[in-house]
Amino acid sequence: MREVSIQQLWNRAWDLFKVNWLLLLGLVVLSIIVSLIPYIGALIVVILLFPALVQAGYLVARQGQSSFEEAFRDLSSLLKIFVYELILELIPGILIGVGSILWPGSHWAGSILIVADLIILFILNLFGWAGPYAILSGRAGIFSAIGQSFSLTAQNFGTVFLAFLLYISLAILGLLLCGVGLLVVGPMWYVFRPLLYLALTGEEGVSHS
């Protein structure tokens, strides 16, 4: 287990966000706008824009700066990130599908299913968060990235769990500020996560100025 300061990483994420705010915030806003397009908007976001945001955050953490061109340049990596996230979402999706078939019209069963789905989704995101960065760093393929992410989180559970709790707290605070705070906290989260990954794995990231 590595000693990692969550506060220092958030400070670094803030510094990097200030330098790359146009790129990060631009991708977030673009994703919101595109998601409003009927039928295909959501697909474009999950297949292309969300992976591009993940890749942009990773490049910012590694290099200090990135660009829209770099965020979309490696299409194979974007596809791998999409497939990885799709695999993580399959279990909750299957649960919802099975519940809809087995308990149609049952409100209590549906409520239990929704709660169980949210819990599973949180656990999968908690343990699977590092997978995309293992893929982008070249350390793992799609399936091996799952195992690496779960192992990294298990070995550093306290640090990772604290980071997620802090993000949730900041996101709630952002919502209370008429949602405007999310336009900062959200993009920062995409820089903070690769910074956390680099710190926990001992890989070299951008130095703190």
Image (cartoon, grey):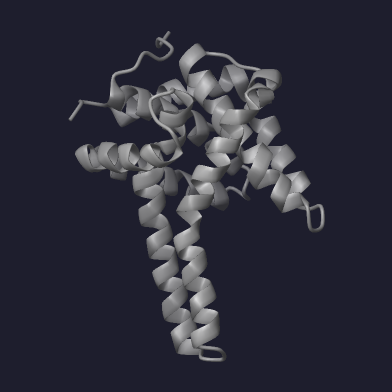
On the image, the x and y values in percent for residue 37 come to 81, 52
Q: Which residue is drawn at 53% across and 50% down?
A: 86
Whole-percent x, y for residue 144 in the image: 37, 38
Residue 109 visible in the snapshot: yes
Task: Examine the rendered structure and indicate whether residue 17 appears above or below residue 128.
Answer: above
Report whether 17 appears left or right of 70: left
Is residue 183 depicted above or below 57 in this figure?
below
- Name the image quarter holding the N terminus: top left
Image coordinates of residue 176 in percent, x first then y, are 55, 52
Left or right: residue 42 versus residue 105 is right
Identify the image quadrant of the C terminus: top left
Q: In this view, does 87 lie above or below 187?
A: below
Name which quarter of the figure residue 186 lies in: top right
Q: Which residue is drawn at 64% across and 24% down?
A: 71
- Would you identify the image quadrant in which residue 56 lies? top right
Q: Nearer the viewer, residue 185 or 100?
A: 100
Residue shown at 63% from the left, 50% from the top? 178
Taking depth in this image into account, of 151 and 31 the one nearest to the observer is 151
